[in-house]
Image (spheres, rainbow, N blue to C red):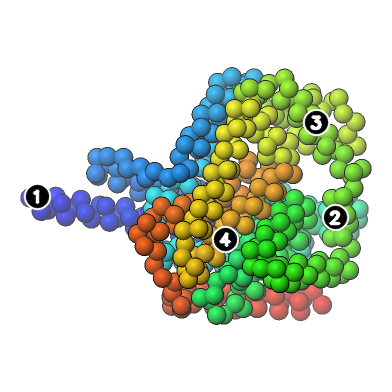
Amino acid sequence: MLNQTLSHKEQVLKGCENLAQFGLFSFVLFLPASIAFSQISLGFILVAYLAEALTTRRLRFMKSPMDLPILLFVLATLISTLFSVNVAKSLKVLVPSLFPMSVFYLVFYYLKDLKTIKKLITLLLIIATLNAVYGIAQHFWHIDWFRLSGHKNYLRPVTDLPGSDIRIPGTFSISMTFAGQLIMVLSLVWSFILFDRSNKNKFPLIASATCIFFALIWTYTRSAWLGFGVALLFLGYLKGRKSFLKLALGALVCVLIIFLLQPSVLNRARSMFSFEQNMDRIYIWKSSLDMIKDHPITGIGQGNYNKLSREYQKSYPFKEPPSHAHSHNDLIMITVDRGILGLLAFIWLWITIFKQTGITLQQIPSDRYYVRALILGCLAGFIAFFVEGFFENNFGDSEVAMMLWFLVAVVMVVKEKLIPATLPADMEELALEEKHMVGILTFAILIIMAVMVILHL
């Protein structure tokens, strides 16, 4: 009877592990494509965790260096909710605002080995690249096949002028979300191109980088352009002076060619340096700072910006109707919602992310090329995200934030689980299933791009 009970328990635990692994892979599969399905996938992982807890009759928790900063950020959020100008509204958005952080703990708990990490990262690059190709198709044909039967048009023009190009959103609802994910994935791809000496065939990575780069350009998201530019220069700097100069020169040539072939991209880039064209954004920042002055310690509470910003923005001469969604700056938005307490917790959060990623890099042996390239790519992605956050509220964008926390979890898994257990040597060859995935990616990209070129001509 005892053996049967133990056997049944082991079967349940094995089932929980399989469900969690299914959730991990389905989460990564849908992360660059659909927030609804990615959240459902996280639900599978959560169910597996709860079922495991019921079976073992204990809640297991794996500690990480991120625990205290996350805890303090959550506490600052709870305090701001209690002292909110409208507690009911703040309570309504409390769980959704903290939900992306659950990605970190669920992934960190169940992600355990390098082989699984490689499969997940390969899958992420494939799906993100296919989404980029879909975005490129949107640019050429101005049709959103993903939502062809929908009543809402997500393909918004760059300007109000007739014949204006569109800002491609991929499978998302807005181009800024698409761009926010693309810059992190593109940082990863370029890191593998530059630093993964264990991979001799770089063609699939170069094809992926090309597709994602053009998709990023055609989102017309200036903050994302700037964020990725800084991340790419960071990777080039780490590669060495010659590589840095080659990378900078190559990027400059590509940008100049795009400017010559597509003046709308040049005009969009020029607007970054136009004080007059950016005055409305500055007024949004100023009005948000006014809100901080009136609610400095705990902020106004989440969910209240839309209503209160309308009153504060009346003091400024906007040329066009301003946005009431957010303040277009992570640091300002965090302070508006959560006050100085939230800002301090947020800054500590980022200091910990950068510090722990740097420590992880120092601990990885120099001959572990894949893992070093992976962590460098994550670090470059964090830099791109952080820089973009000076001009966008990407931390408050669930799809983008979930990508961030997934990569943070990957870094912590390497640091807390793989390095202490003696990091396994890089595999010189990809596994058979990974080769099939890369082959399918390359073939799909070539076919789709050929069809697009033929039809466009």
Pointer 3: what residue? 286
Query: Hey, what amino acid is under mark 2?
Result: Arg
Q: Residue at x 72, y 19 (%)?
A: 294
Mark toward the start of the polypeptide (3 vs 2)? 2
Is 11 or 342 nearer to us in this picture?
342
What percent of the width, then of the height, locates residue 375?
A: 53, 59
What residue is shown at x 51% (from left), y 42% (from top)?
Answer: 101
Write down the quadrant of residue 63 in the picture. Answer: top left
Q: Secondary structure at mark 1?
A: helix
> Eyeballing the image, is 299 above or below 450?
above
Q: Nearer the viewer, mark 2 or mark 4?
A: 4
Read off the residue under disc 2.
Answer: 268
Q: Which residue is mark 4?
A: 376
Mark 2 → mark 1, Cα distance in angstroms: 71 Å
- Where disc 3 sits, the SS reads helix
Give the CA distance from mark 4 to mark 1.
50 Å
Q: CA distance from mark 1 to mark 3?
A: 69 Å
Q: Cα distance, mark 3 to mark 2?
A: 23 Å
The disc labelled 4 sits on which kind of residue?
Answer: Leu
Q: Upstream in the sequence, badge 4 or badge 1?
A: 1
In terms of secondary structure, where does tag 2 sit? helix
Q: Which amino acid type corresponds to the residue marked 1 in the rendered image?
A: Leu
Cα–Cα gap, marks 2 and 4? 30 Å
Residue 279 shown left or right of residue 295 in the figure? right
Q: Report the residue marked by disc 1.
A: 2
Q: Looking at the image, is mark 1 or mark 3 nearer the viewer?
A: 3
Tell which tag, 3 or 2, sits nearer the viewer: 3
